[in-house]
């Protein structure tokens, strides 16, 4: 097994205009290697000390043609240095720290993306479809719209947007590294082998009908690899009923027998569905079959899949996905109290 280590150096800078050598800590113009050493900013030093050295990741925020996939992202701009700092701190809080706490020693150094490229603006396809980002072999991730992301926002639409475009993306891609090293259980693939759509996944489902075929998202129906990592990423991101905090033993308040106060739950549910998804409610939507001859309902398949995911992560990687998910959600609930604008030396 090859380790996924990269040399612990930051080669952030490749090209520069000799007449416009940046002198300010706010510069996002690309520097040459020699100039990088002479003009290294506090943010550069911060990235090296707080990310590259402990986590073995190269973070690129300066404008570099070599680091951006121009075949897809033709008209994009670099992030401001301030927004790059905020994004780095946000990822540290929501990805690097919880994974470090709850995974074996050295895990992130080997099995996390090796390069993060921060791009300031959003990007769109020729037909106007917005890209969420781009991952290359789960090793390099290009993150879009960094200038417009406020990780401490209270706006429900923006919270959902950040959860999908940033958090789901990095949880998804880092999970690819695991299933590329240790094979996913064959039983997982067998559950949906007749329903994988390949490249046709985008046009294969009406609404959320993918749920009744046992896929947590339409994209999960592409192939077993995407199915497996989407199941992990969305299980982590989605809220769960036990977060309501409205348990009751009073049967007059709990008419459906789920152990929750109906009124309190519906109030909580309304707020949650403005900014995300509830795992159990997605399972309820999956409680049926697209193909009446199928052996299992979509809900039964999803329950079997998350059970296999849980066993795989615990058995192969010594990771408790439920403990990891709980820590991530604890931090998520505290985001509005955080200040990501400062260096955390």
Image (cartoon, rainbow, N blue to C red):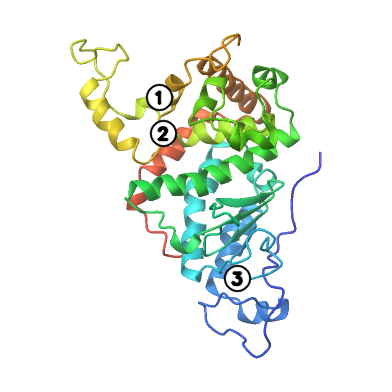
Residue 42 position in % (x across, y down): 53, 72
Quadrant, the N terminus? top right
Along the line of sight, the residue nearer the viewer: 152 or 156? 156
Q: What's the mark number on residue 62?
A: 3
Residue density around tag 2, few if under 14, some if 14–19, many if 20 or more, within 10 Å: some
As drawn, is 38 to the left or to the right of 163?
right
Q: Is residue 52 above or below residue 328?
A: below
What residue is drawn where x is 41% and y is 34%? Answer: 277
Residue located beneath label 2 in the image: 277
Q: CB under 8 Å between callouts 2 and 3?
A: no
Measured Cα–Cα span from mark 2 to mark 1: 8 Å
Q: Is residue 329 above or below residue 318?
A: below
Residue located beneath label 1 in the image: 281
Sequence order check: which comes first, mark 3 or mark 1?
3
Please identify, in this view, whether the residue under mark 2 or under mark 3 is nearer the observer: 2
Residue 40 position in % (x across, y down): 60, 76
Q: Is residue 13 above or below residue 289?
A: below
Q: CB under 8 Å between callouts 2 and 1?
A: yes
Measured Cα–Cα span from mark 3 to mark 1: 42 Å
* Residue 43 lies in quadrant: bottom right
Residue 151 position in % (x across, y down): 41, 54
Along the line of sight, the residue nearer the viewer: 327 or 30? 30
Along the line of sight, the residue nearer the viewer: 158 or 316? 158
As drawn, is 315 to the left or to the right of 268?
right
Task: Name the secondary structure under disc 3.
Answer: loop
What residue is drawn where x is 40% and y is 57%? Answer: 150
What residue is drawn where x is 57% and y is 41%? Answer: 171
What residue is drawn where x is 62% and y is 34%? Answer: 201
As drawn, is 328 to the left or to the right of 76?
left
């Amino acid at each position: 097994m090859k380790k996924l280590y990269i040399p612990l150096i930051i080669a952030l800078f490749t090209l520069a205009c000799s007449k416009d050598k940046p002198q300010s800590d706010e510069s996002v113009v690309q520097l040459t290697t020699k100039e990088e050493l002479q003009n290294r900013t506090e943010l550069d030093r911060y990235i090296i000390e707080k990310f590259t050295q402990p986590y073995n990741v190269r973070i690129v925020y300066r404008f570099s043609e070599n680091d951006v996939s121009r075949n897809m992202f033709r008209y994009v701009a670099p992030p401001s240095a301030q927004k790059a700092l905020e994004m780095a701190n946000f990822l540290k809080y929501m990805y690097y720290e919880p994974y470090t706490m709850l995974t074996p020693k050295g895990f992130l150094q080997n099995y996390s993306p090796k390069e993060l490229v921060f791009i300031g603006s959003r990007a769109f396809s020729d037909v106007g479809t917005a890209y969420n980002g781009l991952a290359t072999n789960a090793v390099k991730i290009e993150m879009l719209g960094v200038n417009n992301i406020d990780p401490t926002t209270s706006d429900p639409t923006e919270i959902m947007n950040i959860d999908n475009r940033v958090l789901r993306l990095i949880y998804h891609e880092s999970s690819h590294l695991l299933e590329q090293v240790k094979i996913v259980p064959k039983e997982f693939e067998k559950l949906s082998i007749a329903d994988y759509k390949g490249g046709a996944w985008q046009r294969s489902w009406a609404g959320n009908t993918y749920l009744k075929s046992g896929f947590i998202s339409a994209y999960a129906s592409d192939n077993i690899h995407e199915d497996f990592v989407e199941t992990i990423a969305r299980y982590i991101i989605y809220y769960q009923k036990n977060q309501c905090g409205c348990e009751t033993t009073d049967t007059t308040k709990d008419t459906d027998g789920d152990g929750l106060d109906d009124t309190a739950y519906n109030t909580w549910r309304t707020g949650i569905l403005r900014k995300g998804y509830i795992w159990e409610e997605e399972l309820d939507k999956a409680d049926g079959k697209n193909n009446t001859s199928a052996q299992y309902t979509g809900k039964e398949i999803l329950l079997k899949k998350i059970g296999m995911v849980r066993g795989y992560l615990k058995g192969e990687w010594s990771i408790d996905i439920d403990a990891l998910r709980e820590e991530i959600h604890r931090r998520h609930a505290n985001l509005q109290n955080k200040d990501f604008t400062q260096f955390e030396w």
